[in-house]
Amino acid sequence: MALEVKEEGWNKGKAWIEGADQQVVRAYAEQAEEDLLNFLKYRKNEIKIGGSLFMMIGGRPSWSKNQLGDNDKDSSLKHPFTSYMDQALQLLVDQDVLDVKKRDGFNIRVYLRSTEEVKAAIDRCGGFQIEKMVNLKIADNMNATPMTWIADPSLYGKKRAELAEDAAGQFITDRFGSDMKNKLFERYAEVAKLDTTLIDKPCFFHMIAVSVTRI
């Protein structure tokens, strides 16, 4: 999602929009709608009548106003972009490794859509008929081995940091450079390993699978 941040620090203290002010969430939602609409317009021009398009899109529960579900606190706290990320960035600031203004001007440009938002973009574009759309609840890769993480919190922290780097590493590098990225995820691993309250809690994320036919 190509979001233009118009004001430094508009989401101060947070790397992502989960739990942010509604004006921030609305800005992300509006940009996400335009991004998906533009994607669909290009595909409409490319696909012949009768052709199919299948999409997997980062999603959230349809009833949820929050990005990660209103009633799943554990998934919200363990998500790669939320509490561990914010704490790791704060550590860099506290240790005078990262300037606070640079931290406050950083936002992970990801918006998780509902099925209603996906349908609205498809309808607005026109030229496509929805054949099937499913909101999939997917288990985190680390859910299956909770006793491993309880026995070795350092390994837990390292693995959570690796998952976060896979998801957000390019955003960090683009904003701060590769050296700062490495320092950030070192702190991320340290933060995660100390979080004994969540270490054995399962978490989930959502993906929207949708198939459409060009009409």
Image: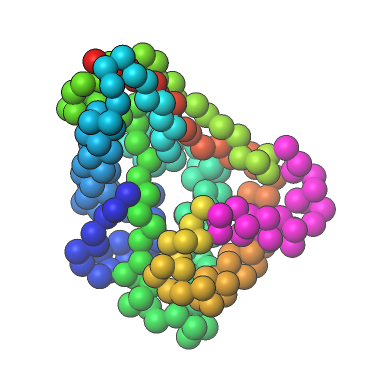
> Quarter of the image holding residue 201?
top right
Q: What number of labels is visible? A: 0
Horizontal and vertical percent position of residue 207: 46, 32
The colour scheme of the drawn protein is: rainbow
**Residue at left 31%, top 69%?**
105
Q: Is residue 158 magenta?
A: yes
**Residue at left 39%, top 16%?**
132
Horizontal and vertical percent position of residue 100: 38, 78
- Horizontal arrangement in the rendering, residue 66 relative to residue 86 (left or right): left
Horizontal and vertical percent position of residue 34: 21, 42
Which segment did they paint magenta? Answer: 144-166
- Horizontal arrangement in the rendering, residue 27 relative to residue 196 (left or right): left
Viewer-nearest residue: 176 or 91: 176
**Residue at left 64%, top 64%?**
189
- Horizontal arrangement in the rendering, residue 124 relative to residue 79 (left or right): left
Q: Is residue 154 magenta?
A: yes
Viewer-nearest residue: 58 or 170: 170
**Residue at left 41%, top 68%?**
174
